Amino acid sequence: MQTLWQFKGGLQKGIANLSFSPSGNKLVGVAIDNDHYVAVYDIEVGQMICMDKGDTARIVDIKLKNENEFVSVGPKHFKHWTFQNKQMSSKKGQFGNNNNLLRCLAWNDNTCLVGAADGKLQTWNGNSIGKTYALHQGGVDSLWVGPQYIVTGGADANIAILDKSSYATLLKFTLDSVCKNAISPKIRSACFASDQKTLLVGTYGSEIYEIVTK
């Protein structure tokens, strides 16, 4: 393993989250300082492009959509960010009456998907929330988008598989129904392998399961 770049300065007191752009040329990171600073790096030249305050609220997930746009989420935090050259700006999310305790996010093409503490999957366009889908009885702690499916995992130990285009629920089951001896069946991570049939599931009990779907 070879170190390509070591970025110094900018973010302080540890890095909470990182996300690469689809091309791999940009990297965004968020620090664990009091203001949860957010910084964008150019991987090709090994330099920081820009940096700004994230929020005094904790940021738990961050994802780049493309080469100049990303979203950050957390408890009482949603920001849609854009950056160009050395300038960056953000817009706070407009929640309306929806739950604002956010746990994870993923991009479904141009739609930002967010898992909330009330068990709903939220859809966002820019900083405006759209439709929501009630999937879990506990918080949504895992969210993955693949070529065909969306997979969510929750604190209720349920895994839901949705059609990527229609958001229709194709399959939903509890981990206990297929893995009887789980130390803690609450889902921390769930995604399909490249065959789009084999689920890889990580739990709060530090267990990893491989589940074959039909």
Image (cartoon, grey):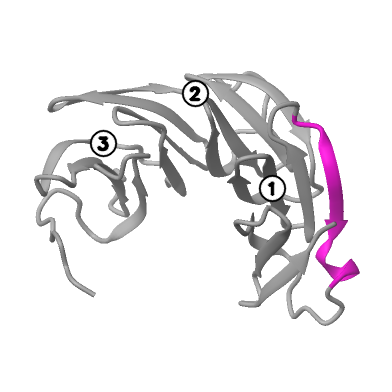
Task: Find the distance from the CA under tag 2 to the CA under tag 3.
Answer: 16 Å
Total numbered circles: 3
Label 2: element kind: loop
Quarter containing the C terminus: bottom right
What crowding class fits label 3: few (fewer than 14 Cα within 10 Å), some (14-19), or many (20 or more)?
some
Q: Amino acid at mark 1?
A: Val
Q: Position of residue 141 (x, y in %)?
A: 63, 53
Looking at the image, which residue is at 78% across and 48% down? Answer: 160
Q: CA distance from mark 3 to mark 1?
A: 31 Å
Above or below for 47 versus 159: above
Q: Residue at x 63, y 18 (%)?
A: 96
Which residue does the numbered mark 2 point to in the structure image?
Answer: 93
What are the residue bounds of the magenta stretch? 167-178
Residue positioned 32% across, 37% down in the render: 54
Labelled disc at residue 38: none
Q: Secondary structure at mark 3?
A: loop
Which quarter of the rendered picture does the N terminus lie within? bottom left
Q: Secondary structure at mark 1?
A: strand
Query: 191 left or right of 10?
Result: right
Please state which amino acid type lies under the numbered disc 3: Lys
Of tags 3 and 1, which is closer to the observer?
1
Q: Residue at x 49, y 23 (%)?
A: 93
User: In the drawing, what numbered circle is on residue 151?
Assistant: 1
CB within 8 Å, label 3 to label 1: no
Callout 2: 10 Å neighbours few (<14), some, many (20+)? many
Q: Is residue 109 left or right of residue 11?
A: right
Residue that numbered label 3 is attached to: 53
Q: Earlier in the sequence, mark 2 or mark 3?
A: 3
Frontmost residue, 25 versus 130: 25
Spot occupied by residue 152 in the image (x, y as percentages of width and height): 69, 48
The part of the image, by quadrant, that contains residue 165 is: top right
